[in-house]
Image (cartoon, grey):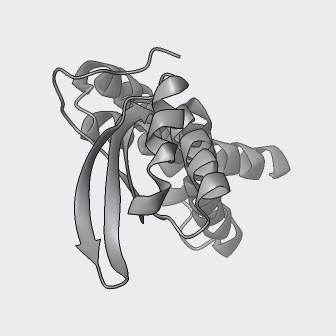
């Protein structure tokens, strides 16, 4: 009985984690890897579901099934975050007086496009970058270190073409 409950629990963690990664791949347009992951996801899910459907009057099995789903959401999110698949758009708005930040980022090899803007507190400089996801937080930290009052927004680009992308 304990082994069966453990199997149900871990099967749900696995299938929901795979589902999370599959959805991220679909959003990014990677349909074939998503399809392969989906095959294994539904296989694990069907086996776990089969162990619970015949025992819906067993609240422990149902609870373990649901708990595995909940933890699978968390585990899938952590895995996806660590894999850092794809790219992230980073848009930072800084005071125009801190334009040296652009030069420093470019000197370090980061692609930065800028334009001037006007905000409530005066003239601003908007920095726009598309970088690998694992680099986005590093860039944000650099910007905040130089300009603690910066306004930074992350975006998820689905498709882009041309421009300069830092390789590392």
Residue sitting at 56 percent across and 31 percent down? Answer: 83
Q: Nearer the viewer, residue 90 or 157?
A: 90
Residue 143's x, y, as percent? 56, 51
For the question of whether residue 135 can be seen, the reply is: yes
Is residue 128 shown above or below 148? Answer: above
Residue 23's x, y, as percent? 34, 43
- Judge left or right: residue 131 versus residue 107: left
Q: Residue furthest bottom?
A: 120
Q: Residue furthest front?
A: 97
Q: Quadrant of residue 35?
A: top left
- Judge left or right: residue 82 versus residue 56: right
Residue 105's x, y, as percent? 51, 35
Q: Nearer the viewer, residue 11 or 142?
A: 142
Residue 6's x, y, as percent? 76, 48
Q: Nearer the viewer, residue 166 or 104?
A: 104
Is residue 118 shown above or below 126? Answer: below
Q: Nearer the viewer, residue 29 or 149?
A: 149
Residue sitting at 26 percent across and 19 percent down? Answer: 32
Is residue 150 shown above or below 16? Answer: below
């Amino acid at each position: 009985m304990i082994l069966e409950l453990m199997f149900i629990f871990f099967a749900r963690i696995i299938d929901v984690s795979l589902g999370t990664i599959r959805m991220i791949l679909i959003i990014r347009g990677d349909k074939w890897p998503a399809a392969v992951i989906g095959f294994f996801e539904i296989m694990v899910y069907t086996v776990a579901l089969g162990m619970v459907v015949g025992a819906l009057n067993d609240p422990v099995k149902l609870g373990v099934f649901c708990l595995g789903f909940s933890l699978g959401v968390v585990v899938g999110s952590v895995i996806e975050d660590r894999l850092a698949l794809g790219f992230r758009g980073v848009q930072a708005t800084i005071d125009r007086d801190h334009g040296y930040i652009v030069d420093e980022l470019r000197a370090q090899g980061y692609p930065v496009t800028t334009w001037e803007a006007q905000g409530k507190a005066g003239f601003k400089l908007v920095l726009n970058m598309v970088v690998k996801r694992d680099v986005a937080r590093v860039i944000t930290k650099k910007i905040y270190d130089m300009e603690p009052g910066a306004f930074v927004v992350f975006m998820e680009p689905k498709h882009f073409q041309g421009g300069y992308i830092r390789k590392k």
